[in-house]
Image (cartoon, rainbow, N blue to C red):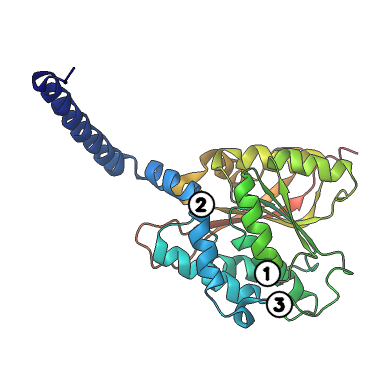
Amino acid sequence: MPISTARTKPNKMLFFQALIAGAFAIGIIAVFFPNILTTISSSTPNLARLRSHISAQPPAAIKNNPWALMAQIEEYADKAGHLMIFRRAKLDIAHGALRSMSQPPRVVLEFGTYVGMSALGWGAILKEIHGGDGMGVGGAVKEEGCRVYTFEKDAELVRMAREVIELAGLSDIVTVIEGTAGEGVRGLVAEGEIQPGSVDMVFLDHWEKYYLPDLRVCEELGVLRMGSLVVADNTDKPGAPRYLEYVRAGGEDGGVRYETKTYQSVTKRLGAPSAVEISTVVDLGVSRF
């Protein structure tokens, strides 16, 4: 039996009313809660397009060259829209802090791998500090005990990160661990991969609400040492108020104590997060061992 026109017109009207209402709601969210849309769009990047962009580059230009590969990832982010990457301007700030450490860094824990941008940076920096060329080639980095352990829950992002790390020639020192960061750190300690007092830098760049709980896991396990750095991204936008309150108060009485400083990176993107919080361990407190 044919569908009555009289019955379909109200349905069309309802459809257009719903469409208008949805557009209005998105507009309200965009105005009053811009970080929500940013998080939704950037938490699931188009990995196929990123792979295509990387594959389109001359192999000789990016293979075993993490700095060139990072530049291509950032170029893609500029063209294709926002990606939650730790951009070169911020990486340079952390690079300077790592190079200025009195005891050269060897072990880095990264909380939040995403597409592998910052993990490439840590691997390249460790190679540079320990005698390599910072391009995935040369230097007795593995023999020096240099390791980067990075944690990511999303299986697709884990695959993407492992691909770029292998392409950059850093698979010997950078390990991507699938799962939650807290569980990953506990597992590494239980397996003896990480020893007490052996972690030189912790990098926090996952969900901001987990910054403080995951730092407390590191404190509980005793993996930090005097002079260890804790680098936290996006402490201005979307912000990590509980974490900032904790490190700016110096940590906890009787526990690990910190001195902290906020650095502002230079960004071309209007309204983009620019702050990097770098905290230094100045007291290990009461030993838990």
Q: Amino acid at mark 2?
A: Asn
- Compared to residue 272, the image places residue 15 above or below, namely above
Q: Label 2, on which residue?
A: 234
- Between residues 48 and 61, which one lies in front from this camera angle? 48
> Distance from label 3 to label 1 (Cα)?
14 Å
What residue is rendered at 65% in x and 53% in y? 159
Q: Which mark is residue 167?
A: 1
| Left or right: where 192 falls relative to 35 | right
Q: Amino acid at mark 1?
A: Leu
What residue is rendered at 86% in x and 75% in y? 140
Q: Quadrant of the N terminus?
A: top left
Would you call the spot at circle 2 few (<14 residues within 10 Å), some (14-19), or many (20 or more)? many
- Compared to residue 152, the image places residue 94 above or below, namely below
Q: Nearer the viewer, mark 2 or mark 3?
A: 3
> Distance from label 2 to label 3 (Cα)?
26 Å
Helix, strand or loop at disc 1?
A: helix
Q: Nearer the viewer, mark 3 or mark 1?
A: 1
Q: Label 3, on which residue?
A: 134
| Left or right: where 31 falls relative to 123 | left
Mark 2 or mark 3: name the one nearer the start of the chain.
3
- Between residues 60 and 10, which one lies in front from this camera angle? 10
